[in-house]
């Protein structure tokens, strides 16, 4: 099991050759990025114009319908995850340390990311390269559910931003409102909270830890591929 952050986890020659013939699984078969965590590859599942929330089907790698957007809140940015990341023990422990909460676990999903851009992107199921500038420490029940905030590489409006403090407060508030309400259902108590907004350096640390969690969780996958 790896303890240090590395990129190109599964991008050995066999993995690259398989990608020429078969569609790569967005979670496992796409490289996190050679310059990660400074610039990361992201897989975008949902865009602001979507009226249905899509998410990756972990088994097949295809997008599936998660649920219709029942209310007026829509995701205010491109939304997806960082490939070859996993929110496991290291992410849970880091969240517990920073929040002062006990018994926090990773949510068992790839690390979520929002990508800000001034362009209207018409659909998801795409890859984008982004610069992390901060994040939300979100806790859902007893699970760490961090949201990395990033800017699209080369974007005219957001592309030069290096830290979340450069964002207008209105944009931060809009993102917070979405994540605190998008799971709300009438008659049910909300169980999500954002305990902290953190800067770019901490966002990069979260990405590193999630990559280490991925290595620990899917070590057998890399071993299986290396045997071909």
Image (cartoon, rainbow, N blue to C red):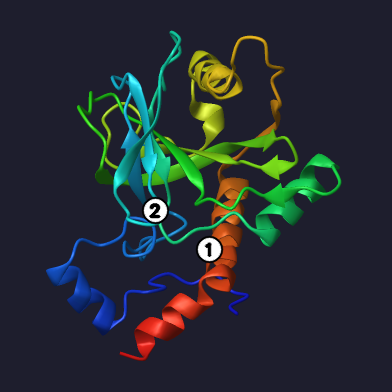
Q: Which of marks 1 and 2 is nearer the N terminus?
A: 2
On screen, residue 184 versus residue 189, left or right, reads left
Q: Which residue is drawn at 56% across and 29% down?
A: 165
Q: Which residue is drawn at 56% across and 23% down?
A: 183
Q: Quadrant of the N terminus?
A: bottom right
For residue 134, above or below residue 75: below
Helix, strand or loop at mark 1: helix
Q: In which quarter of the image is the C terminus?
A: bottom left
Q: Mark 2 points at which residue?
A: 40
Report crowding for label 1: few under 14, some 14 to 19, many 20 or more residues within 10 A (C-alpha). Answer: many
Report crowding for label 2: few under 14, some 14 to 19, many 20 or more residues within 10 A (C-alpha). Answer: many
Say which mark, if any, is on residue 211.
1
Q: Residue at x 36, y 45 (%)?
A: 130
For residue 135, above or below residue 224: above
User: Which residue occupies the extreme left position in the image?
Assistant: 21
Say which of 142 and 200 sits in front: 142
């Amino acid at each position: 099991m790896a303890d240090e952050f590395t990129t190109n986890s599964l991008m050995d020659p066999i993995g690259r050759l398989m990608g020429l013939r078969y569609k790569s699984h967005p979670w496992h078969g796409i490289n996190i990025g050679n310059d990660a965590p400074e610039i990361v590859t992201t897989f975008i599942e949902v865009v602001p114009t979507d009226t249905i929330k899509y998410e990756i089907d972990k088994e097949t790698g295809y997008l599936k319908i998660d649920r219709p957007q029942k209310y007026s809140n829509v995701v205010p940015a491109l939304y997806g995850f960082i490939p070859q990341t996993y929110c496991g023990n290291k992410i849970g422990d880091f969240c517990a340390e920073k929040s002062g909460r006990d018994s926090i676990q990773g949510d068992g999903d790839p690390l979520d990311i929002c990508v800000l851009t001034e362009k209207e992107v018409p659909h998801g199921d795409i890859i984008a390269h982004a610069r992390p500038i901060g994040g939300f420490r979100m806790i859902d029940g007893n699970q760490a559910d961090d949201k990395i905030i990033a800017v699209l590489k080369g974007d005219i409006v957001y592309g030069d931003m290096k830290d979340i403090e450069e964002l207008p407060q209105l944009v931060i508030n809009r993102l917070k409102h979405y994540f605190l309400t998008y799971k709300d259902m009438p008659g049910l108590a909300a169980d999500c909270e954002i305990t902290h907004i953190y800067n770019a350096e901490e966002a990069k640390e979260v990405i590193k830890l999630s990559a280490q969690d991925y290595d620990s969780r899917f070590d057998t996958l890399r071993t299986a591929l290396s045997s071909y």
